[in-house]
Image: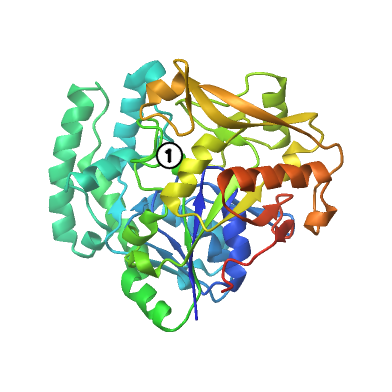
Amino acid sequence: MGKNVVVIGTQWGDEGKGKVVDLLTERADAVVRFQGGHNAGHTLVIDGEQTILHLIPSGILHPGVRCLIGNGVVLSPEALLTELAMLEQRAIPARERIGISPACALILPHHIALDAAREKARGNKAIGTTGRGIGPAYEDKIARRGIRLGELADPTLFEERLREVLDQHNFVLQRQFAAEPIDFQHSLDEAMTQREQILPLMADVSGELARLRAAGAHVLFEGAQGSLLDIDHGTYPYVTSSTTTAGGAASGSGVGPLDLDYVLGIVKAYTTRVGGGPFPTELDDAEGQQLGARGHEFGATTGRKRRCGWLDMVALRRAFIVNSISGLCITKLDVLDGMERLRICVAYELDGRELEAPPITADELERCTPRYIELPGWQTSTVGAESLDALPKEARAYLDALSELGGVPIDLVSTGPDRAQTLMIRDSFDD
């Protein structure tokens, strides 16, 4: 019998999900993106060749694997076509492998303009968005004024809908932010050009997933960003605009929640964050700089430098709960090679009280002081280790502590950027 496996980031994103999805795709018949936009930034390194995907599912590099974009994704036509062209230049027949839900809300030029104007107006309180229009597109979707991919099929309807929403958003751009308005005709002409390439890619994603389930196929659901950026369960308001937790795999693709069989949580061996927001274990010292340099901690989407810190089990335990995590994949263990000591946050202190769960508000989290346990580091390389026994005993102790503190078994360990540099302890698709 086939399994539906969900791959979720358990921190603030950038945990290395793309590599893991690509590895597991070797067993999968289909891969599904179910939330987010072209801000995912999944980096794949296969036989030394790097591919960065922002929107298209990471399984696109595999022949015979169906790649689906579910209704929970906000779709930038421009980004989609750019990514397709990049893949086709490498002789990857992406259009033959991809199917997109017509219920995807579109990201249009006015969303990008609004995103930039709002971040500029926030000044030093900016959320740190990618500026790609994703938040405003979700806002339109929830306000029931968003334009869906399927509406491109009717040019008259699309023109009417675009005129309606653009009048409203141009008013805000000009009056509230003193920004340049978006030209209606240019936006319409661009969309009409794009539609000829995109409409043939539309598919009944929910129906396809039901048929795959009935046929006993293995399906991989690929999350974007991370659990701590979830619109409901993350460090609000310093979050993304979608449901990044495992529940979003059901609502964002059209499968029933009981059809999700296994949830793999991706955990970076330390913690990073891009953009604004509280970060209790952040390191503003040489150790933090060492983690950033060794881990090449720059955003694949934005190029922004990532903030680095120690592993935070308080945040991770909550992520394990809200995602029903079945097993863990630990990534970037090799980045810790050569460090004298390692620390793991096991509790927070706030106003003299000890907390074993994150506080409700971002302001409270900002005031939290982490409480650590300390473990010895290791001085030998873990890169490319082919078994757990090949790891230094201190590295094994670190992994054991992480699993014990989180109450979840470790199923995979990544010891390098290439797909082959992964220890598989348990296959997520096995019964």
In the image, 230 versus 181, the foreground residue is: 230
- Residue 12 visible, this orientation: no
Against 364, residue 223 (above or below) is below
* Quadrant the C terminus occupies: bottom right
Against 12, residue 286 (above or below) is above
Residue, far front: 353
Q: Position of residue 282 (x, y in %)?
A: 58, 25
Residue, far bottom: 215
Q: Position of residue 94 (x, y in %)?
A: 50, 67
| Residue, disc 1 | 229
Residue, far right: 380
In the image: residue 262, left or right of residue 398: left
Picture mark count? 1
In the image: residue 271, left or right of residue 142: right
**Colour treatment of the image:** rainbow
| Residue 119, image quadrant | top left
Name the residue at 37% across, 80% down: 211
- Residue 314 visible, this orientation: yes
**Amino acid carrying mark 1 in the image:** Leu
In the image: residue 26, left or right of residue 184: right
Q: Position of residue 251 (x, y in %)?
A: 31, 59
Name the residue at 25% across, 22% down: 177
Q: Residues within 10 Å of mark 1 (few under 14, many from 20)?
A: many
Label 1: element kind: helix
Name the residue at 71% across, 24% down: 287
Against 243, residue 254 (above or below) is below
In the image, 96 versus 390, the foreground residue is: 390
Against 375, residue 126 (above or below) is above
